[in-house]
Amino acid sequence: MEIIIQPDADAAADMAARIFANLIISKPDAVLGLATGSTPLPLYRKLIAAGLDWSGITTFNLDEYIGIGPDHPQSYHAFMQGNLFSQVNIKPGNIHIPDGMASDPEAHCRAYEEKIRQAGGIDLQLLGIGTDGHIGFNEPTSSLASRTRIKTLTERTRSDNARFFGGSGEVPFHVITMGIGTILQTRKVLLLATGKNKARAVAGAVEGPVTSMNPASALQLHPSALVCLDEDAASELTRCDYYRWVFDNKPSWQKI
Ligand code: GLP
């Protein structure tokens, strides 16, 4: 894992935007894995402002709530449309988000995996992290080999996400999410985390044991995982001096 610590959330988003922009420019037909939540919002704003060409880009989102349609304001379809897709020239046919209204969700999950495969796999997967270490909606105790499937949210995640729904009673119980195995198969992952409330989950993911109790710790098994943090999210890591030293002394061909 490569840990990049930036002074604040805006600088962390800048770094992540640079990594995404570099890929979109160098590989105009890249396949991106995208995420929702508050954390990626500044990154999406920066990518929009960069005026990049998205006409050849394909995207796969990590997850969606079951039982709410794409027009529901809290659906991840609506989130992505409002915060990114409506403001770049991506082709609607190149956008993939799990369908929370699929009549046969299990068949839909299998088909989603197949579409990722047919697209040639995901070049760069963006991830946030839940306060319990979840990635996508892979809650603690998710199989580290899991593929896209239906999951039941924990009470903690439902209450963390209640702020968007006007009370946790409205947050769906079930979701479709790419699995941890699906995420581990992507060519590169970029986990972006900001804020003190993520510090414990980040420390467990980076410096703790690989355990399904902290699903993000599975990224230790990924051959190319970048973890981009602000100071607050990095505040419970014990090896920050080393991470900073590695970043400051990158050989020129590895500079971001
Ligand atoms: C949701 C999403 C995750 C996201 C997490 C953290 O549960 N399914 O992909 O990482 O929220 O969100 P936030 O960035 O708002 O803290």
Image (tube, grey):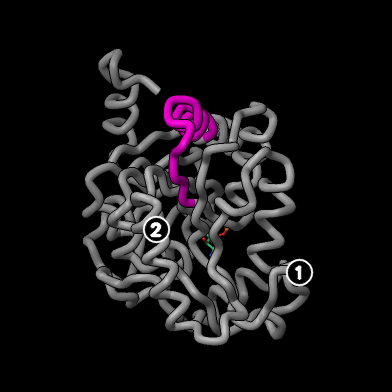
Q: Nearer the viewer, mark 1 or mark 2?
A: 2
- Tell me which residue sits at (64%, 33%) in the image: 46
Q: Which of 58/41 is in front?
A: 58
- Tell me which residue sits at (54%, 33%) in the image: 17
* Label of residue 116 in the image: 2
- Tell me which residue sits at (39%, 58%) in the image: 116
Q: Which of 85/196 is in front?
A: 85
Q: Position of residue 78 (x, y in %)?
A: 71, 61
Residue type pointed to by label 1: Asp
Q: Position of residue 174 (x, y in %)?
A: 54, 83
Decide if residue 88 is on the left or right side of residue 95.
right
Mark 1 close to ligand 1, CB under 8 Å: no
Is disc 2 placed on a helix, strand or loop? helix
Q: Which quarter of the image is occupied by the C terminus?
A: top left
Magenta residues (range):
17-33
Q: Position of residue 25 (x, y in %)?
A: 49, 26
Are there few (<14), some (14-19), or many (20+) residues within 10 Å of tag 1?
few
Q: Which residue is mark 1?
A: 71
From this view, report whether residue 143 is shown above or below residue 15.
Answer: below
Q: Position of residue 100 (x, y in %)?
A: 59, 76
Q: Which quarter of the image is occupied by the N terminus?
A: top left
Are there few (<14), some (14-19), or many (20+) residues within 10 Å of tag 2?
some
Residue type pointed to by label 2: Ile
- Tell me which residue sits at (61%, 29%) in the image: 52
Q: Is residue 67 visible?
A: yes
Decide if residue 88 is on the left or right side of residue 203.
right
* Label of residue 53 in the image: none
Is disc 1 placed on a helix, strand or loop? loop
| Ligand 1 picture quarter | bottom right
